[in-house]
Image (cartoon, rainbow, N blue to C red):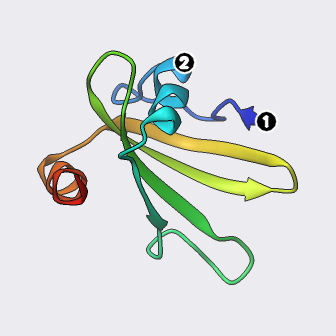
Amino acid sequence: MIARPTQTSANSVSFPAAISAFSDPDSVEFVDEFHSSAQETRYALIGMCALGLVYVVFTEVDVGVIRIIHARRADRKMLKIYESKE
């Protein structure tokens, strides 16, 4: 199950668009070491959504639930990571 984000901002993307990035077979997922702590590991997924845009989706994992913390369009650095994995 994927839980809706608790916070939104002007740079946020829609929940359905963020979820669609998880379906991208070329997506790249890694531990977000900058925002992780000893109590909680956060992840970042870079993937193309159903609209054809590349998004970065930040998540944390609870038992049986992937919680979306934030999602936004990928910046140049994230696009470069995404494109290098294809």
Q: Is 44 located above or below residue 14 in the figure?
A: below
Q: Which mark is residue 82?
A: none
Residue sitting at x 36%, y 25%: 10
For label 1, the SS is loop
Residue under circle 1?
Answer: 1
* Mark 2 Cα-neighbour bin, 10 Å: few <14, some 14–19, many ≥20: few
Residue 36: percent from left, percent from top: 57, 73
Identity of the residue drawn at 25% across and 58% down: 85
**Label 2 is placed on what type of residue?**
Pro
Q: Is residue 17 above or below residue 57?
A: above
Residue found at x 34% / y 37%:
55
Q: Which residue is mark 2?
A: 16
Q: Amino acid at mark 1?
A: Met
Q: Is residue 68 left or right of residue 29?
A: right
Q: Which residue lies at the image location 62% right of the left edge and 78% below the top edge?
A: 37
Task: Please identify the quarter of the rendering in which residue 49 is found.
Answer: top left
